Image: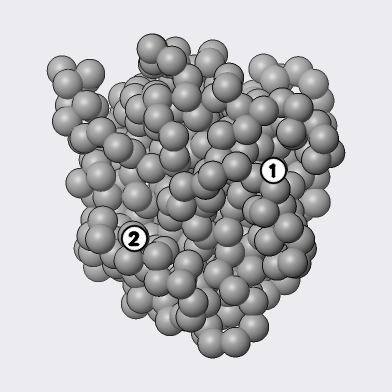
Amino acid sequence: MTVATYDVVAIGNAIVDILSQSTDEFIAAEGMTKGSMQLIFDSAEADALYSRMGPGQEVSGGSAANTIAGLAALGQPCAFIGQIADDQLGQVFAHDIKSLGVHFGTAPASGGEPTGRCLVLITPDGQRTMNTFLGAAQNLPESALDPETIKAGGILYLEGYLWNAEQSRDAMKRSIEMARAAGRKVALTLSDIFVVEGHRDAFFALIDAGEIDILFANDNEVRAMMQTEDVEAAVKALAARVPTLVCTHGPNGAEAHSGDEHARVPAEPVARVVDTTGAGDLFAAGFLAGQAQGRDLETSLRMGAICAAECISHVGPRPQADIKALVEKRLA
């Protein structure tokens, strides 16, 4: 097996987030569930919601792309594969991710759906309610996969959200085959409870076939996977089926199980929760960076918690502080 050029290669939705301060009343009036993510299925509906929102701030996003941005900020070499369109938001996304030093070679699609966007409403308590129009992102074809890039990654990191569309789902399955053929590890983040509810059996088929080495989940997702309200029992049962399970518990910290090894850490303190957008993505960045550096489970979890705490202290899903220096300071 050749030495990996990248610590992590991620495949996910290439999306630009449009962040807007909002109120509980607006979210209720729009019929949204606060703190959740719902899909918008056509660009006209997305445009209509955007017109009713307050002033917005454009920030490149997408779950796996946020994780890669965090990894790059931590100094880890990485790459991203995701579909954009040949339009203004596509140019914004490509510029932003390349400016971080991330390898991004996916060609923009001409015609068809525009670049995906996520309309994020942030309430005063820091909770984010997301309305996602996937656009071109969900149409990632197998032809967009660069086999050499995938083979060059120590870990292939897959975003569960992409499992919802048949074309991108097929591309992800093919990417797993490529990574496995190169002797690489595969990590999957379950992304959201609605993803689990729609694809639970498919995810278990991957897990039971030994295709997933690292699984990321939160309380809701692990409960949905194991179909129980008992989080502790769900974590224990799921951990028995996957080589490494990482489960985040929000303000109650996070834990990881890998064989007979188990570690749990508290959440890092933060002066004020401003925006929880991307917290789980940056947690995954810290944890994966720790694993790439050969750290133990507990240290990797702490790195994830430090990155997540920085993320929720400001608006937007990507680091604003020097998280590499922050991690080094907190671990010293």
Q: Residue at x 67, y 28 (%)?
A: 23
- The image quadrant that residue 285 belongs to is top left
User: Where is residue 164 drawn, in percent x and y?
Assistant: 72, 60
In the displayed orientation, state which residue is furthest to the bottom: 110
Nearer the observer, 28 or 178 = 28
Residue 91 left/right relative to 136: left
Q: Quadrant of the C terminus?
A: top left
User: Where is residue 207 drawn, in percent x and y?
Assistant: 64, 49
SS category of the residue bearing label 2: helix
**Does any portion of residue 136 appear in the rendered image?**
yes
Vertical side of 185 occupied by 286: above or below? above
Give me the disc on residue 103. none
Query: Are there few (<14), some (14-19), or many (20+) residues within 10 Å of tag 2?
Result: many
Amino acid of disc 1: Met
Q: Quadrant of the N terminus?
A: bottom left
Q: Earlier in the sequence, mark 1 or mark 2?
A: 1
* Residue with the mark numbered 1: 37
User: Where is residue 327 drawn, in percent x and y?
Assistant: 23, 27
Vertical side of 37 occupied by 259: above or below? above
Vertical side of 262 occupied by 83: above or below? below
Nearer the observer, 288 or 106 = 106
Amino acid of disc 2: Ile
Residue 66 left/right relative to 7: right
Nearer the observer, 277 or 246 = 277
Query: Are there few (<14), some (14-19), or many (20+) residues within 10 Å of tag 1?
Result: some
Vertical side of 236 occupied by 135: above or below? below
- The image quadrant that residue 97 belongs to is bottom left
* Residue with the mark numbered 2: 97
**Does any portion of residue 207 appear in the rendered image?**
no
Q: Residue at x 56, y 54 (%)?
A: 159
Q: Residue at x 40, y 25 (%)?
A: 313
